[in-house]
Amino acid sequence: MANNRLSMRKITETLRLHYECGRTHREISRAIGASPTTVGDYLRRAKVAGLSYPLPDGLDESALELRLFPPVVPSDVVRPEPDWVWAHREMRKKSVTLELLWQEYKAAHSDGYQYSWFCERYRQWVGKLSVTMRQTHTPGEKLFVDYAGQTLPIIDGLTGEIRHAQLFVAVLGASNYTFAEATWTQQLSDWVSECHAEHRKPFCPRAGAALRLCAQGCRAGLAQAKRRRADQNCRMTGIAAPSIRRRITAATGCVPLPVEPPRRRGAG
């Protein structure tokens, strides 16, 4: 959002302090209550408009504003429109960002949109899509936890050996406050290792805890198939082993919940 424009009285005072008193941008900013960047912008506009101080006779505030902020003439240049359907589909892939998509777009269309407009146009296009699901998050209620799909290469500084670490991510639903930490594996011990489990660490920086802990389909939660059924040790779907649930609750003060209600399965 653009900053609110200063009054013509303050802009006139900016010109007076600069041209008549020789004050610096920082001194002027303190005098008129604006940032040095804003002061520099107004002085640049005055120079382009051929204005200094004192102002020409007969130049009222309306005329001064018109000279400092001339109306923008609409451009008749037609920019090639990106394929937003393709861009939206690519954004679902791992490691794909709007900047990467814009670079591909500019490589194919050198006269296309710049990055800021590319992002703005994409957000406008996404805003017109039909909403399929809306979730309301109460502050402090739910913490969503899972492992990221990609791994992080860790290089040993002495031997040069490269090991790939797993990335644990925890996000608060309402604020989107995010915690991330690398672990070597996604084993059960990495999830609930007494009071040092990953689920407790996101709360330490803020000295608080969410009411509910939500995870879905974590690889660590699904053990080997035993007796023709999957032993869901720590999937946190509401049917996890009571001892594990008690350990999580004791370590974090949270109640493990599924992201989605468990589906009924036929006997078999």
Image (cartoon, helix red, strand yellow):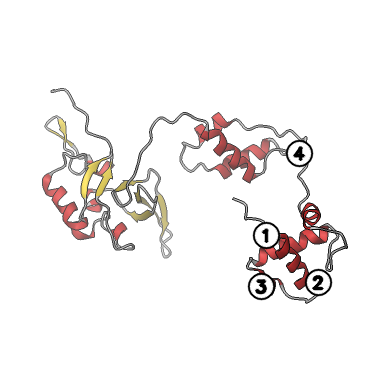
| Type of amino acid at the residue the image marks with label 1 | Leu
Give the number of the mark in front: 4 or 1: 1
Residue 231 image position (x, y, % from top left): 16, 37
Residue that mark 1 sits on: 6
Residue nearer the viewer, 225 or 26: 26
Real-space Cα separation, disc 2 to disc 3, in angstroms: 15 Å
| Type of amino acid at the residue the image marks with label 3 | Ala
| Type of amino acid at the residue the image marks with label 4 | Pro
Residue that mark 4 sits on: 74
C-beta proximity under 8 Å, tags 3 and 4 = no
Residue 9 image position (x, y, % from top left): 72, 63
Q: In which quadrant of the rendered view does residue 8 lie?
A: bottom right
Q: Earlier in the sequence, mark 4 or mark 1?
A: 1
Residue nearer the viewer, 33 or 98: 33
Residue that mark 3 sits on: 31
Real-space Cα separation, disc 3 to disc 1, in angstroms: 13 Å
